Image (spheres, rainbow, N blue to C red):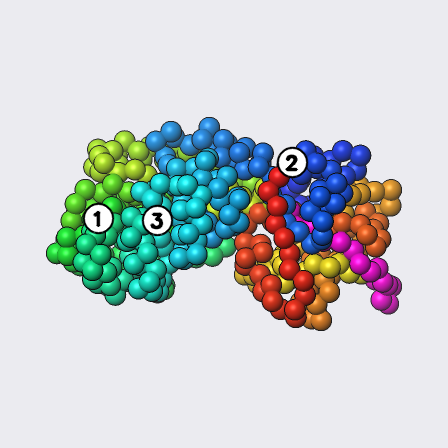
């Protein structure tokens, strides 16, 4: 008896009519004509709205939602998200400009990331956003720049906790890390913030990303709140901000199941009265990126050749790892696994076949789908990669081999 292979979670967020995907209510073929070129990324406003509404409905109302721009910094998308969430989190001066242009209040923008340079810190101070301090050097530099500007920098401490988010795609806390200040060093840093008379906002405690196990996130939240309450004893002022990070994952690969929000929401509801009693001025923030935008995006490339090599069929497209490194398996995967992929203009098709979809780059790494069953496709058909709204174009080596650039649209 054969073993049943796990399937991708159904990608039904984009409806199919007449065997053609629709994005923002527009048939994919019509959208491609409107964009005027392939490859392109398309992001659906309706799906962005729906995901934020889902979280608002599931989580306690006191929880604030922030969008981490690094997941997708497309300016039009960030402007849309700014109208849905309570704050934006940036990780560079370029992202800060996008956040400010989006109309978000500076009081609701925070800046994280190791190695912030003096010009970045100076711009953050001038803008009046919160700087998540990640080292003693950043603290001292921010204090000096604040004096030069006649401003009191708004600061929070990014904490590298002594635990990690188990089963996360990328571990951002626990053990030696370039991110944040080790938890045991935080009290001294807090005392120095008080000595320098900087505005103290609170803590940013981030432990990991891309997690589909609710129990792991619940455990991380428990330990995060415990740590924050302990560190607050040395704070130079009231804690007004408690950013507990994110880590919420989305299903990418065969066998992945969507994250169950219910246990997470129940646990947050249990903790909020404790936090309110101990830290009465604190706003608890969930900082999410991929979870908010990842499922709302598609990557679309066109088949430019079809060939058979020693009995196996290859579909060659005009897009690949230079636009979508993650789908190629070269952005954090240890063992390459296929993203969900379909032929967007013939989703089911009249014939099916097992094919490998590759890009035009002269490297064997340029694979979008390896030995997947798809509708039979030919030159001119549109290959679609789902789950492409986060860590797509800007996380890819777009200059590699000098191929034409990709465009992005919000529909």
Q: Which label was assigned to residue 200?
A: 1
Q: Earlier in the sequence, mark 1 or mark 2?
A: 2
In the image, taking residue 85 as reference, residue 5 lies left or right, namely right
Residue plotted at (15% across, 49% down):
236
Q: Is residue 239 visible?
A: yes
Nearer-the-camera pick, 42 or 277: 42
Residues at circles 1 and 3 in contact by the CB criterion of under 8 Å: no
Which SS type dominates the magenta stretch?
A: strand
User: What separation in Å lies between label 1 and label 2 (alpha carbons)?
Assistant: 43 Å
Q: Position of residue 340 (x, y in %)?
A: 67, 48
Residue plotted at (68% across, 33% down):
25
Q: Position of residue 374 (x, y in %)?
A: 78, 49
Please state the extent of the stretch shown in magenta in the rendering.
Answer: 298-313
Q: Give residue 93's quadrant in the image.
A: bottom left
Q: Could you tell me which quadrant the C terminus lies in?
A: top right
Q: Earlier in the sequence, mark 1 or mark 3?
A: 3
Residue plotted at (58% across, 54% down):
392
Q: Give residue 355's quadrant in the image.
A: bottom right
What is the secondary structure assignment of the residue under circle 2? Answer: loop
Q: Position of residue 36 (x, y in %)?
A: 72, 49
Nearer-the-camera pick, 206 or 133: 133
The residue under label 3 is 110
In the image, taking residue 38 as reference, residue 56 lies left or right, namely left
Nearer-the-camera pick, 307 or 371: 307
What is the secondary structure assignment of the residue under circle 3? Answer: strand
Q: Which label was assigned to residue 24?
A: 2
């Amino acid at each position: 008896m054969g073993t049943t292979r796990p399937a991708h979670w159904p990608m039904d967020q984009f409806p199919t009519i007449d065997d053609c995907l629709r994005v923002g209510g527009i048939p994919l073929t019509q959208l491609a004509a409107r964009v005027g070129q392939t490859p392109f990324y398309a992001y659906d406003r309706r799906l962005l709205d729906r995901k934020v509404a889902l979280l608002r409905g599931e989580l306690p109302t006191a929880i604030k939602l922030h969008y981490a721009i690094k997941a997708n910094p497309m300016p039009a998308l960030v402007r849309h998200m700014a109208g849905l969430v309570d704050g934006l989190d940036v990780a560079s001066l370029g992202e800060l400009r996008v956040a400010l242009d989006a109309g978000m209040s500076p009081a609701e923008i925070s800046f994280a990331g190791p190695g912030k340079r003096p010009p970045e810190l100076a711009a953050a101070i001038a803008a009046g956003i919160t700087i998540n301090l990640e080292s003693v050097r950043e603290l001292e530099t921010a204090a000096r720049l604040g004096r030069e500007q006649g401003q009191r920098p708004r600061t929070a401490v990014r904490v590298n906790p002594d635990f990690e988010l188990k089963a996360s795609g990328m571990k951002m806390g626990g053990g030696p890390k370039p991110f944040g200040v080790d938890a045991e060093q935080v009290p001294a840093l807090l005392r120095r913030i008080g000595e320098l008379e900087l505005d103290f906002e609170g803590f940013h405690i981030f432990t990991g990303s891309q997690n589909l196990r609710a129990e792991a996130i619940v455990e991380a939240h428990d330990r995060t709140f415990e740590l924050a309450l302990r560190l607050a004893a040395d704070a130079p002022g009231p804690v007004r901000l408690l950013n507990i990070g994110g880590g919420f994952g989305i299903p990418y690969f065969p066998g992945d199941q969507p994250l169950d929000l219910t246990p997470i929401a129940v646990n947050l509801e249990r903790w909020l009265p404790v936090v309110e009693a101990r830290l009465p001025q604190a706003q608890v923030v969930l900082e999410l990126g991929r979870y908010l935008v990842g499922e709302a995006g598609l990557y679309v490339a066109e088949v430019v050749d079809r060939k058979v090599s020693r009995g196996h069929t290859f579909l060659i497209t005009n897009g690949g790892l230079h636009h979508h490194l993650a789908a190629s398996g070269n952005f954090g995967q240890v063992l390459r696994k296929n993203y969900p992929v379909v032929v967007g203009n013939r989703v089911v098709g009249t014939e099916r076949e097992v094919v490998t979809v590759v890009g035009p780059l002269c490297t064997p790494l340029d694979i979008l789908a390896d030995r997947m069953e798809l509708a039979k496709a030919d030159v001119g058909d549109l290959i679609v990669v789902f789950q492409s709204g986060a860590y797509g174009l800007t996380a890819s080596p777009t200059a590699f081999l000098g191929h034409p650039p990709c465009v992005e649209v919000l529909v």
